[in-house]
Image: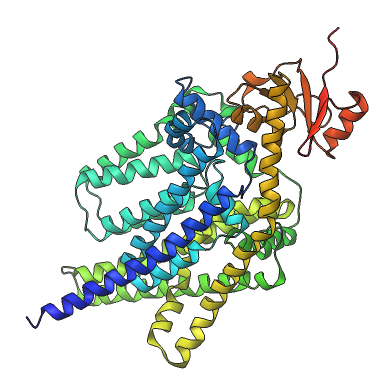
Amino acid sequence: MGDSLPVRHKSWQWKRYSLLAAFFGLLGLLWRWWLSGAGTPPTNSDEATMGLAALHIGAGRGLPVYFYGQHYMGTIEAYLAAPLVLLLGPTVTALRIVTLALYAAYLVLAFVFVRRVYSPGLAVLTVALLAFGADRTVKNQLIAGGGYPETPAMVLGLLLITWLLATRRWERPVAYAGWGLLFGLIAWNHWLPAPFLLGALVLLIAAKVFTARRALSAAAGFVVGLAPLLVDNLTAPLAQNSVSVFLGLNGAGSDASLWERLVGGVWLSVPLGMGLCAPGRCEAWSLWWSPVFLALVVVALVMAVSALRRRAAARRAAGAGPVSAEDRDDWARDAMSLVLLGAGLLSLLSYVRSPAAADTPIESARYLAVLLLVLPAALWPLWRRVRLGGARGALAAVPVAALALTMLAASASLLEVTGDYGRMRDDNAALLAGLRDRGYSYVHAGYWTCNWISYLSDEKVLCGVVGDDLNQGLNRYPSYWHERPQAWVAEAGSALDVKLAQQAGPPVFETGGYRVYPAPAQP
């Protein structure tokens, strides 16, 4: 009877942590559900491109390996959304249900992972921070544009399995096959989390858990997960190989200086990518996070390396012998911290090398969405100090509290634009209605207008992409392109609108911020 009280008390502690995490997670989910219902963030042609892939999959018209016109980014989102698009029709809602579910899975996996590897208290804090949703993070998590909504959940799932294998809680070959399968699926879907994949592999090798049978199981799972990419790369021309395409896209841009890339890629993009900035801008009060985050990562990295070295020295001094489960868990925690922190720094370095870091930091900060995965490891030394209490604990809590308050302020600032985003949704609906009412079935428009016309109209109104010079633009689905449109569509005030006003005469009609111009008469 005497032993039952501590067990009962411990059980209540676990339930309390779980309930707190569920509370914060539900707030985060409701915030995103409300935002999406209010048209925030607005849909775009990239999201519509993934919707078209889902539409074609559901209709049995194709099994696309890559995001249309991209040839390196996988289409997991499209396969997940295909049943809903088939059931609900081609709507933004059908796509956002999937991304909301992926966000929910992200929160659950974050809580389980951080609770097991670090502590239940830090797990609750992590979920609470992830529940905040500023402009850039909400776009990453809700817009089904490929690569971002599913990546955090998939990577955390892989890292959780890695930890379970490294600590030998899971030892059956089927677990290694599952690890390899998820590894392959992530590699097919997007290369953004490549440093985390490499770290997970190195951790398992360092844990010395691979046997011939387990390695074979992991390799078999990996081949199955990566099969779509492998088959396509073996049959595609070298210039269209996914590796060549990705490297080409990563290096495209201006010849910005290193200083410009550091300012855009670190000073601005770190708070942007981690959800501390208002829509389209980073206020001065949010930029403090860049140097603080880097300092936290470096300190945590040094501490993890030091702990691993001390543990290795102690192991050598003690001589050969069985390793206790507690020692294995401690080693796995420090090794996992090393993986997370190292992968985060590699991701940041890769981004800074890209011209996009200097050219378009506001939009390109999406490439740093993976930095949120690093947050628990970066905060772990602070959290340990907070738990000790006292003056040092209170001091350690300051940056954590400041981070939460900044994220809260950035999330609240999103309310500034929800009205504008809602009007954009209404404008899109008005344009579609006007095109249908006039019997148009094929039009030309700019890139950011075209594919959502095709998707939201259920391909009743197809659209070919033109540039501002009225010549053929980037058509991700080439079958939509024809030389003779029935009309041209342009956003009012855009360069395309000015060009059409000069060459096509007065618009046929104008609605919701768009102008529809007549096509020239056929000779």
Counting every numbered tag in the picture gives: 0
- Please identify the quadrant where the C terminus is shown: top right
Q: Please indicate whether residue 332 sits to the left or right of residue 493 in the image.
A: left
Residue found at x 43% / y 73%: 380
Residue found at x 51% / y 30%: 89
Quarter where residue 13 is shown: bottom left
- Please identify the quadrant where the N terminus is shown: bottom left
Viewer-proximal residue among 212 and 366: 366
Say whether residue 335 is visible. Answer: yes
User: In the displayed structure, would residue 150 be above or below residue 282?
Assistant: above
User: In the displayed structure, would residue 453 be above or below residue 249?
Assistant: above
Viewer-proximal residue among 318 and 295: 295
Q: Please indicate whether residue 87 sits to the left or right of residue 443 in the image.
A: left
Residue found at x 59% / y 50%: 139
Residue found at x 85% / y 16%: 520
Q: How is the image coloured?
A: rainbow
Query: How far across and how far down the image is residue 102, in percent?
Result: 44, 48
Say whether residue 357 is visible. Answer: no
Quarter where residue 72 is shown: top right
Viewer-proximal residue among 15 and 404: 15
Query: How far across and how far down the image is residue 173, in percent?
Result: 21, 45
Query: How far across and how far down the image is residue 360, in percent?
Result: 72, 51
Quarter where residue 160 is shown: bottom left
Query: How far across and how far down the image is residue 445, in percent?
Result: 75, 29
